[in-house]
Each structure stands twice: as structure tokens, then as C-alpha cells.
Amino acid sequence: MTQILGQFCINVRDIEKSLEFWEGVCELPLHHRTEIPGVLEAVLQAHEGGSRIQLAQHLDNTDPIDMGTAMWKLYVNTSDCKRLYKRAIEAGCESVMEPEVLERWPVTVAFVKDFDGYLIEFVEHHEGTRPGVPDPKKS
């Protein structure tokens, strides 16, 4: 028996604004949109594979997203951490940490908060990714 993490679904306040970040800034292709009673959904995934992210706007809730304590951050593997960080800041995301090389792993990472307040870590691998993880530098 084999299991593979396939998709993560996060709540968003405004699906169009959230798509500005995930599709516009992060350049993840939109695969499809769905409307079910009371909920607008959109699914994005890189052509190279990796997990999908599903955005869900509950139309009956206009309150800010309650981050609680369950989720810490979302990772976005990138071929150019500095460029992606710059695009996010120019789009109006909040800077948490500018791009920094971490010799221990070896990667460059940066942190931003998206328009809903989710902590996003941009990760650029300098020596390739682990087996099974698509490498953005090889696409």
C-alpha cells in the first residue's frame, strides 16, 4: 500500500485576492475552479508536479482567517528565492525575513505573509531536492 500527500486546502477571505498571490506572484498554474453551495474553490499546481494547493472561500464568512496554532507555514520550492521574494513584496505581502543563505541545508530561504496572513517560506535548493521532490531548477 502506498500513500502520497496530494492536496492541501486552506481557507481564504477573497479567492480573487488569494489567486493574485498564488497564481500571480508565485506563478503556480490554476488547474480548475469549482463553485459548490456557499464555497468558491480553486486548485493550483506546478506543471512539474508536487502537491496541489486548494483555496476555499466560504461565502457566509467574512471574518479574518483564524490562524490558530495548528499550522505553522507553507513551503514553496523555487528556482529563484530572491526574485520570488521581491515579487511578493512588490505585490503587497508582508516581509517576515529577507532571502538568506542557510549553509546547514544548503538553501536560500525567505519568509512572507500572504494576503490572508499565512506564513509562506520560499526555498531555493542549491544542491538539488530530495528524491521524489520536483526540482524547480530542472524544469
Image: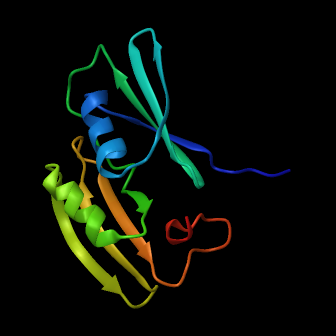
Q: Quadrant of the image for the C terminus?
A: bottom right
Left or right of 137 in this view: 58: left
Residue at the extreme top of the image, as rendered? 37
Residue at the extreme front of the image, as rendered? 139
Left or right of 137 in this view: 80: left
Residue at x-position 56% and y-position 42%:
7
Residue at x-position 16% and y-position 57%:
89
Q: Quadrant of residue 106?
A: bottom left
Q: Where residue 11 sits: x, y (%)?
A: 36, 33
Please say if 50 is above or below 24: below
Q: Quadrant of residue 30?
A: top left
Q: Where residue 138 sits: x, y (%)?
A: 56, 70
Q: Where residue 113 sits: x, y (%)?
A: 23, 53
Please say if 51 is above or below 32: below
Colour treatment of the image: rainbow
Please say if 38 is above or below 129: above
Q: Where residue 103 sits: x, y (%)?
A: 39, 91
Residue at the extreme bottom of the image, as rendered? 103
Residue at x-position 29% and y-position 44%:
21
Give the number of callouts: 0
Residue 74 in view in this figure: yes
Left or right of 25 in this view: 50: right
Left or right of 105 in this view: 102: left
Please say if 122 is above or below 24: below
Residue at x-position 80% and y-position 52%:
2
Residue 70 versus residue 123: which sits nearer the camera? Answer: 123
Residue 111 in view in this figure: no
